[in-house]
Amino acid sequence: MAIPPGFVWIIRNTPRFLVPPAATYVALRLLRERQQLTLPTWLNVIACILSLPASFILSFFYANFRDARAAAARGAVLAPVAPYKLPGAIDKVGALAKSFTTGYIGEVPNADFKAVGNTMNSRIFWENRIETIEPEYIKAMLATQFNSHAKGESSIDSAKSLLGTGVFNADGETWKFHRSVTRPFFSRDRIGDFDNFEKHADDALAQTKARLKEGHPIDFQDMVSRFTLDSATEFLFGKDVQSLSAGLLYPPNSPLAATSAAKDHPANVFAQAFLESQISTAIRFFYGPAWRLREFWKDEVQKHMDVCNAFIDPIVKDALMRKREAKEKGSGREKGQVSDEDTLLDYLVNVTEDNKLIREETFNIMIAGRDTTACTLTMAVYMLSQHPDVLRRLREEVLAKVGPSQRPTLEDMREMKYTRAFFNEVLRLYPPVPFNARSTISEPVVWPGINGKPPIYVPANTRTPYSVYLMHRRKDLWGPDAEVFDPDRFLDERLHKYLTPNPFIFVPFNAGPRICLGQQFAYNESTFFLVKLLQTFSTIELAEDVQLMPPADWAKAEGRKSVEKIMVRSHLTMYAEGGLWVRMGEANPAETA
């Protein structure tokens, strides 16, 4: 039986609570025995109790003094502290939690960055938390000073219930092992095989056409999440989980939504548990190591993961059984050997029979394969519903380069310059992973000085969150129209003015040694599906009678918040709360290039 999270926190922190009172008690005993100074019992008790806050305050101020001195010795400065009224920036934690459920994505840290600067120390629960949206510092974390940064124990601990020790939640040799295992499965030949995409895209679009003909809008986010889940699991396991077989959702205002049996379909149960597990994990990051106090008696993520694991375990069990049968027949391969026909699951069961390791690794890659592409396509269609001129230009390119019904090839995709620019603009304003974090390791780090400002000193073992989402919207990096959706910025003079001289202002897939292995896979899958979509439909409109819309007062805000028509949210990845409900008009069958 697992130890409750709160008990784990107490066990880990017991020395911090025991040492000050114990040291105070020993000191009082020595005073009594050697100096003949006897204090009343009640005063001894008070002294031992007060030793805890006193030691905390002293250690806090000493750490500040030590860090400032170490920074000065290196010709650097400490990051400015974000001002908050309550001790431990508890009011910021509350603001983050509230914004997570009712606010606009990123508005709390964005307000802090505007007030303090593009790099700041949040000091949540009195611990250093150096947050940044500076491309030079993000570059240092991801590339130039990669070996001085890691995921860090705090981030790994927060996500362990969801990701285990898979490739996205590991450091050091464990990460290198997982990376080496997955890299061969994203080769050019494998990600260029479009049979998988075509089968599931055709299924998804056929169901979409049928539902629209019934007179109902469709939840595009749900539909495309099923498409990416089925294509990802076929890519990883050699067999898809058939989530599209559950059928598409009916709008919540339809009587059919309540009577549909689809919600009890195993794939839907998995998808709901998967969503809840990611939301619960995201909330933990607000609290840092203190998340265990919030979930004192029960791991809120694990209860959802039990559902997810029940869905994945039979697939892993079946693969292990096939391996043992092949071995008994003498047809098994040497450990670590991989063939062109192998899936990632085939390779993993050949390397190990550790069910937990196999499940965690495939689950990590499945998250990347499903969620990031589903997010990109969801936000792409959202933008098309708001920009019919962009939709028209994209269809013109699709019809000119591919045709009204032909299957796109890699060569076609290379020539579709506007389509690539369109996806880049979607990824700029709505990157699938809007917030991420690293941590310094056992040695302090100095980030370089920029724009005439001194370097920033980052103490050892310090969390360093960063946001590509907020960086992608900075007007000083992208121009005065940074919050305007305009794919042409990746084609005209703005590309050479802003991005070419500073490529780290655009990193939707991260960078450096931990750059997303599936970057090209995601581009290929997204482009393939978009081509098929635009061959099938010529108009896209947001179903505002069904869509969960933002509060009316958002229209009075500044920037993109004022024009949003959906509630953009983020757990590990970005998504539209309540789905993306659209109506689409079918293309003219007689249409030709």
Image (cartoon, grey):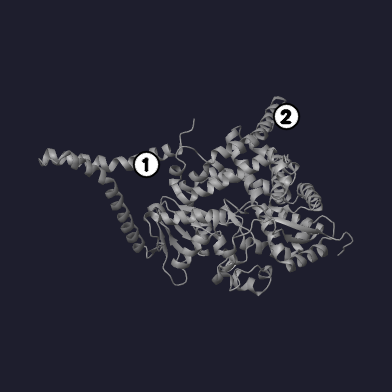
| Disc nearest the viewer among 1 and 2 | 1
Left or right of residue 147, residue 380 in this image: right
**Element type at marker 1?**
helix
Tally the numbered discs.
2
> Is residue 507 positioned above or below 151 on the image?
below
Picture quadrant where residue 14 is located: top left
Residue identified by numbered label 2 = 331
Residue 349: where, in percent of width, then height? Answer: 64, 35
Q: In the rendering, at what x and y percent does residue 214 appear? A: 81, 51
How packed mark 1 is, by other alpha carbons closer than 10 Å (few <14, some 14-19, many 20 or more), is few
Of the pair 216 and 487, the residue shown nearer to us: 216
Observer able to see residue 358: no
Is 565 above or below relative to 220?
Answer: below
- Position of the C terminus, as image quadrant, is bottom right
* Mark with earlier residue (1, 2): 1
Check residue 13 in the rendering and tell me which mark sits there, or answer none.
1
Q: Residue furthest right?
A: 590
Mark 2: few/some/many CA within 10 Å (<14, 14-19, 20+)? few
Question: Which amino acid type is marked by label 2?
Answer: Ser
**Which residue is located at x 52 percent, y 42 percent?**
160
